[in-house]
């Protein structure tokens, strides 16, 4: 049984086997959660990301996929970087957003993680409406059949927390 928990706060302050980063495809850092993770996690994360860019992900990490690096100075074993879709009013990109959650869980499971913390992927700079982002996140995790003991959503502000709480019921 997987327990889904909600926390309001800064994901870089969390303790979990795996902490998920809402990265961009360059893997070389950005704003929002990405910036916060690299700031608090220190340079080891970026070093791993650069190695990935020099190897398997020369063209960047495609949207909807996930890859793990060290967690550096964070209180975690791994950071799992995933690239959410930019929200579009004309194109349904829900499947790509669901894929971020599924692929992150798969990568975490393959590593042997038992606890994982997610931010609300794509709901910041990438513009996804928070209520729909929360629905996709919770539905996807519930349907994923993951080996995690705990899946934690770490929501930065009260509005996001409320959106996830409404989905958990
Ligand atoms: P994206 O580009 O995928 O939209 P963002 O980092 O801009 O990624 O935002 C994703 C979500 O993460 C937003 O809901 C934003 O409020 C939230 N967020 C920003 N910083 C943090 C943080 N330190 N911890 C947890 N959530 C955060």
Image (cartoon, grey):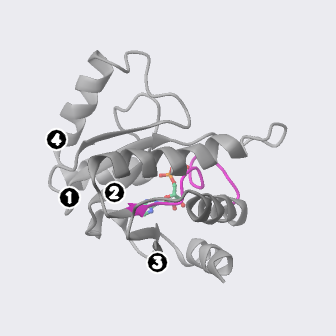
- The image shows residue 60, relative to residue 86, as above or below, that is above
Query: Mark 2 packing: few (<14 Cα in 10 Å), some, or many (20+)?
Result: many
The outermost residue toward the right is 90
Q: Which disc, if any, is residue 35?
A: none
Does residue 137 appear anywhere in the picture?
Answer: yes
Residue 93: give x, y in percent of width and height.
72, 40
Residue for point 29% across, 25% down? 52
Secondary structure beneath disc 1?
Answer: loop
> Of label 1 and label 2, which has the lower sequence position?
2
Secondary structure, magenta segment, majority class: loop
The outermost residue toward the bottom is 169
> Of label 1 and label 4, which has the lower sequence position?
4
Find the distance from the CA under tag 1 to the CA under tag 2: 9 Å
The residue where tag 3 is placed is 5
The residue where tag 4 is placed is 43
Left or right of residue 5: residue 68: left
Find the distance from the CA under tag 2 to the CA under tag 3: 14 Å
Query: Mark 3 packing: few (<14 Cα in 10 Å), some, or many (20+)?
Result: some
């Amino acid at each position: 049984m997987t327990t889904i928990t909600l926390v309001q706060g800064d994901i870089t302050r969390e303790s979990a086997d795996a902490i998920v980063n809402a990265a961009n495809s360059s893997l070389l850092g950005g704003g929002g959660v990405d910036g916060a993770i690299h700031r608090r996690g220190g340079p080891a994360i970026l070093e791993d990301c650069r190695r990935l860019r020099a190897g398997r992900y020369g063209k960047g990490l495609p949207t909807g996929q996930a890859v793990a690096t060290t967690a550096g100075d964070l209180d975690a074993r791994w950071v799992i970087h995933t690239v959410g879709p930019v929200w579009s009013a004309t194109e349904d990109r829900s499947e790509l957003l669901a894929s971020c959650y599924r692929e992150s869980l798969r990568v975490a499971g393959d590593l042997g993680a038992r606890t994982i913390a997610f931010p609300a992927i794509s709901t910041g700079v990438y513009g996804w409406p928070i209520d729909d982002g929360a629905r996709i996140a919770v539905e996807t995790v519930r349907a994923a059949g993951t080996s995690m003991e705990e899946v934690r959503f770490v929501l930065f502000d009260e509005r996001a927390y409320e959106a996830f709480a409404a989905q958990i019921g």
